[in-house]
């Protein structure tokens, strides 16, 4: 208790000092400094997406929409933690991505305590992790800005408040990560997979527009700039590569394109509720299609949708909710999405660029069932001078 209290007041003091210097410079977490992400020696990089934990206060927090037989006596936030811990242990991902509504603000007594508990399995795993915010995170004791400032100080996170070079970007929690080639390989200094994280906001702040928020022009400009820089670097000496490295984008609120997406076209998964996107289409999907590097976007927000399918070369994928305090559907297991990128290996056994990107989901059942495995993207054969493995 005393410990938490100290922590909170030290944090309050920190926030005060940060606001005094005007928050021009986002703090960079010490743990993340110099921490470079690379493909493993097996030529793989694996990401676990954790969507909509909706964590509140722990053991005292009840569960929504669970089957009575299974959970009548004991279900709480701790079931969310237990499932997440089991998936982390089973998949051993290289990165864990929390796509928002990490805490269920309106039911949370203390946002710091709630976040500490919600991110604890990721921190305990020692695996690098990142988070973006949903529309519920800021509903208790911390604002969106304060939440991100706190998150970037937690152990092993590579989250950032905002990109250091962008001084006028909307939201909090817009940043990218570069996944480099295998250590000791000729591509070890190049980013072969680019991850973009964006703040999709909470609710519209424009009085004439109702509903959820959207990805603003400033964020799209930052994405465009970053994507172009990464392409230049990818094409530079030494070992110039062609085109762009594939990218993946993670945020909370689905793009309007999810709403009209014909799930007959979805290769896997289901739609069981209407998409809760913004009523305004700010054109981020069009921007992604125009740039062409992002092969898939991963969102949360709609807990009982978990489909994944391609539209104009971009996969639209839901994570499917993990949180027991979040609404769900009794008998339809809580779930989490895994993504794996595999590298090409050429005739001499050297690792090359990305060959394919695949995904599947894990269910919170006895066997952590793997479902809906699918290929999201493969490198066109003309681009890879490579033997198939
Ligand atoms: C679904 O697929 C069909 C055939 O490929 C295509 O004509 C149609 O535009 C797609 N619809 C959506 C919403 O993606
Ligand atoms: C981003 O770049 C693409 C083309 O590369 C362009 O079509 C789009 O309008 C740009 N988006 C913004 C917000 O500037
Ligand atoms: C295999 O890839 C390495 C690293 O990119 C490159 O140096 C080598 O020339 C390639 N070998 C062949 C046969 O393509």
Image (tube, rainbow, N blue to C red):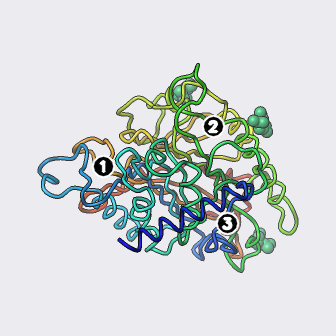
**Residue 38 in view (yes/no):** no
Around disc 3, counting alpha carbons within 10 Å, would you say few (fewer than 14), some (14 to 19), or many (20 or more)?
A: some
Residue 283 locus on image (x, y percent): 67, 30
Q: Secondary structure at mark 3?
A: loop
Residue at disc 3, CB closer than 8 Å to ligand 2: no
Q: Using the image as rendered, state which of residue 140 and residue 89 is in the foreground.
A: 140
Residue 89 figure quarter: bottom left
Q: Residue at x 34, y 67 (%)?
A: 86
Badge 1 is on which residue? 325
**Residue 231 in view (yes/no):** yes
Q: Secondary structure at mark 1?
A: loop
Badge 3 is on which residue? 28
* Ligand number 2: quarter of image: top right
Q: Earlier in the sequence, mark 3 or mark 1?
A: 3
Q: Residue at x 60, y 70 (%)?
A: 43
* Picture layout, residue 327 above or below residue 61: above
Give the label on residue 235, or none: none
Q: Residue at x 83, y 67 (%)?
A: 239
Give the label on residue 215, or none: 2
């Amino acid at each position: 208790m005393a410990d938490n209290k100290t922590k909170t007041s030290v944090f309050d003091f920190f926030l005060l000092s940060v606001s005094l210097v005007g928050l021009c410079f986002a703090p960079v977490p010490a743990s993340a400094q110099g921490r470079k992400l690379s493909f493993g020696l097996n030529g793989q990089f694996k990401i676990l997406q954790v969507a909509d934990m909706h964590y509140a206060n722990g053991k005292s927090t009840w569960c929504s929409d669970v089957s009575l037989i299974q959970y009548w006596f004991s279900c709480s936030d701790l079931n969310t933690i237990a499932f997440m811990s089991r998936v982390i242990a089973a998949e051993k991902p290289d990165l864990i991505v929390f796509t928002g509504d990490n805490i269920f603000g309106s039911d949370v007594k203390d946002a710091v305590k709630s976040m500490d508990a919600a991110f604890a399995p990721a921190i305990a795993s020692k695996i690098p992790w990142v988070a973006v915010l949903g529309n519920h995170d800021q509903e208790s004791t911390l604002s969106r800005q304060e939440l991100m400032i706190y998150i970037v100080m937690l152990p092993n996170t590579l989250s950032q408040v905002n990109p250091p070079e962008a001084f006028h970007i909307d939201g909090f929690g817009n940043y990218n990560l570069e996944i480099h080639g295998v250590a000791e390989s000729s591509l070890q200094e190049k980013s072969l997979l680019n991850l973009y994280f964006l703040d999709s906001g909470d609710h519209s702040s424009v009085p004439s527009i109702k509903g959820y928020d959207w990805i603003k022009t400033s964020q799209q400009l930052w994405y465009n700039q970053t994507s172009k820089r990464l392409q230049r670097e990818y094409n530079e000496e030494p070992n110039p590569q062609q085109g762009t490295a594939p990218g993946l984008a993670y945020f909370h609120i689905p793009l309007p394109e999810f709403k009209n997406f014909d799930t007959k076209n979805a290769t896997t998964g289901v739609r069981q509720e209407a998409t809760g996107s913004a009523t305004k289409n700010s054109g981020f999907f069009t921007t992604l299609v125009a740039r062409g590097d992002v092969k898939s976007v991963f969102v949360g927000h709609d807990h009982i949708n978990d489909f994944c399918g391609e539209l104009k070369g971009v996969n639209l994928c839901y994570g499917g909710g993990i949180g027991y305090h979040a609404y769900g559907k009794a008998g339809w297991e809580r779930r989490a999405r895994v993504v794996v990128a595999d590298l090409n290996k050429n005739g001499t056994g050297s690792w090359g660029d990305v060959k394919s990107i695949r995904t599947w989901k894990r269910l919170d059942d006895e066997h952590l069932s793997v479902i809906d495995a699918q290929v999201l993207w493969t490198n066109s054969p003309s681009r890879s001078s490579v033997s198939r493995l």
